[in-house]
Image: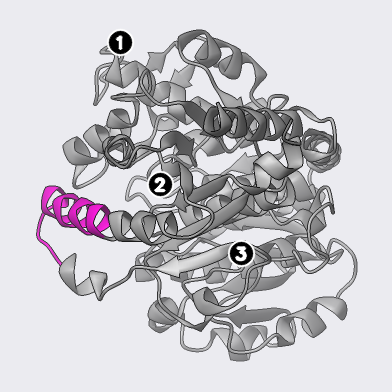
Amino acid sequence: MESPRRAAAETHIIALPFPAQGHINPMLQFSKRLVSKGLKVTLVTFIDNELTKAKHGSVVVESISNNSEENFKISTMEDYWRNFSSLVRQKLSEIVEKQGESCCPISCLVYDSIMPWALDMARELGVAAASFFTQSCAVSAIYYHVYKGRLNIPTDVDLVSLEGMPPLESCDLPSSACGLEKNCPAMISLMSDQFSNVGEVDWILINTFNELEEEVMNWMASQCPLKLIGPLIPSKYLSKRLELDDSEYGLSLFKPRTNSFMQWLDSKEASSVVYVAFGSLASLEEKQMEDIASGLKLSNYNFLWVVRESEENKLPKNLMNETSEKGLIITWCPQPEVLAHKSVGCFMTHCGWNSTLEALSLGVPMVAMPYWSDQTTNAKFVADVWRVGVRVKVNEEGIVTKEEIEMCIREVMEGESSSILRRNSEKWKMLAQEAVAEGGSSDKNVERFVAEVTCNITA
């Protein structure tokens, strides 16, 4: 009889993330966990630079960029997806065919859930398929209701009641659900279509953990079978069960100019730094950048602010001269390493799901400043459900004022609720670590997936 470890070693997974930072990183971390369980994994990326060509543990990274960015400069989202899916279909077939000639052919395709058409490709190629959700269970449930026609979008009601969740105001729903995005109908269709074929897929995987979203998870599980496998952040900060150097995600759309920020952080007192980062996609108005800068100055706390090179021209001209003793502005950093640093006492974030999970898993209280997409829902849970942060209020012009930013920073760092926020953050940090530790809820789900996909191949 073949041993489970040997059977696993002959199981080859191909991981297909959507080409955006918040989608690539958790897929890479999941790939590393599968490799640690004995599987072979090839991760397909549309980024072609020295970071993707580097070795990422035992995960094989294969780029199929083919100048795809030029191909995707299309006027409509529909045209983008048509071209994108055509490229994926062509390149994926080539990869599967090439691997089929080797001693370890592809057994299963793990694809990003916003690409439900990848299931058809998996079936055409004769491999099993898993849909991988990079957003929270709560956000997934909202779009599931939309797909089923139980929630009309955009909604015109003040309060929405959904199974497994607290009452949600319209501002707590994903921004597309509120009609706040330019391509609202296309975005709603894109996100709700994740569920168009979940009844046919072999596995549904979600980057969250049972204890964090227990109520909504139980309701979702009654609708379709789920495996919660998160939080998918580098092992060094959670279970420490993977490679010793697994301290950052590995694939990045950006490169750091320098790592001097670590020496800067080392020079600061414990919990004295406000870390500000808004992800790889957000583009703020110049007025909003000015108010953030002013709010940071008014708070009088040390701050480390990540501003992409493309956004640097929006910064106030004299900012660095005026804050040289208190502030440092950089273009990129390994976020988990910064959040884990003892000097960081507060994280100002748009509340993308990856960043939210990182802060929860590393025990850092947040100032939630949602911008678009699922960030509004994540911010609701950060402030009112998990109680690990405060959420900013916007004015009539849609701007978060410098006074509001100062007030929120002070509330998290020194206000009446600061001790509660820190206590709750520590609680979720402990529960996140337990979930991915050996025998934890997420670890068991990864083990079950490995066993099932291996059994599926050897049957």
Q: Is residue 54 left or right of residue 416?
A: left
Image coordinates of residue 258 in percent, x first then y, are 65, 89
Looking at the image, tell me whether mark 1 or mark 2 is earlier in sequence order: 1
Q: Is residue 127 left or right of residue 239?
A: left
Looking at numbered disc 1 in the image, what kind of residue is underneath it? Arg
Identify the residue at horizontal 61%, vertical 34% (top origin).
454
Residue nearest the viewer, comparing 408 with 307:
307
Q: Which tag is nearer the camera, tag 1 or tag 3?
A: 1
In reply to whether residue 457 is colored magenta, the answer given is: no
Report the predominant secondary structure element of the magenta stretch.
helix
Quadrant of res 383: top right
Looking at numbered disc 3 in the image, what kind of residue is underneath it? Val
- The answer to whether marks 1 and 2 mark residues whose Cβ atoms lie closer than 8 Å is no
Q: Which tag is nearer the camera, tag 3 or tag 2?
A: 3
For label 1, the crowd category at 10 Å Cα-Cα, with few meaning under 14, some 14 to 19 and many 20 or more, is few
In reply to whether residue 79 is colored magenta, the answer given is: yes
Q: Which mark is residue 220?
A: none
Residue carrying label 2: 395
